[in-house]
Amino acid sequence: MLSYLLLFVGSAAVALWGVMHLVKTKAVVAGFEPLTDDNRHVLRMEWIVEGVALVFVAALVGVTTGLSGRTADSSGIVYGMSAAFLLAMAVVSLFTGARASPLPYKLCAPIFASAAILILVGAFLV
């Protein structure tokens, strides 16, 4: 039971952070003004893509856990690949956004890494 809780909490944290990306896209882009139209479109695209990717990974982990359970043959692959994605995002964030001054950018790496650890512990250690 604890394993399912860890998987769902890790998934929920990633989903919440992804939704926050989507909700805050307009404000983030405005904070970088003045921008050229091309730079505005690219920045908006990148924020939306990261938000959608995070929501997708969260949904994948949550749906896999809810429908297949953590012991299904494919579940381990889903959890491992999702955690690898989140850890890769954490590394990228550590060397990019974490170096920026606004606090939310600094939170990306710890949130991604923590969610990956919750997923891995819930999937393989508990």
Image (cartoon, rainbow, N blue to C red):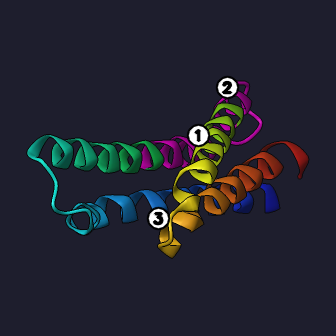
| Rendered-image quadrant of the N terminus | bottom right
Q: CA distance from mark 3 to mark 2?
A: 25 Å
Magenta region: which residues? 55-79
Q: Mark 1 and mark 3 in contact? Answer it, CB < 8 Å.
A: no
Q: Say which label, 1 or 2, has the lower sequence index.
A: 1
Query: Is tag 3's residue or tag 2's residue first in the polypeptide sequence?
Result: 3
Residue 20 part of the magenta-drawn span: no
Badge number at residue 74: 2
Residue at x 57%, y 60% (from the top left corner): 99
Q: In this figure, which residue is indicated by the disc labeled 1?
A: 64
Choose mark 1 or mark 3, whichever is in front: 3
Residue 81 drawn above or below residue 83: above
Residue 8 seen: no
Q: Which residue is more in the foreground, 5 or 16?
A: 16
Q: Nearer the viewer, residue 61 or 41?
A: 41
Asked which secondary structure carries label 2, the reply is: loop
- Residue at image location 71% in from the left, 59% down from the top: 114
Determine whether, in the image, residue 52 is placed left or right of residue 102.
Answer: left
Q: Tell me what residue is drawn at x 82 percent, y 51 percent.
A: 121
- The residue closer to the viewer here, 33 or 120, is 33
The amino acid on which the numbered mark 2 sits, given as a three-letter code, is Ser
**Left or right: where 73 falls relative to 98:** right
- Amino acid type at circle 3 is Leu
- Pointers 1 and 2 in contact (C-beta within 8 Å): yes
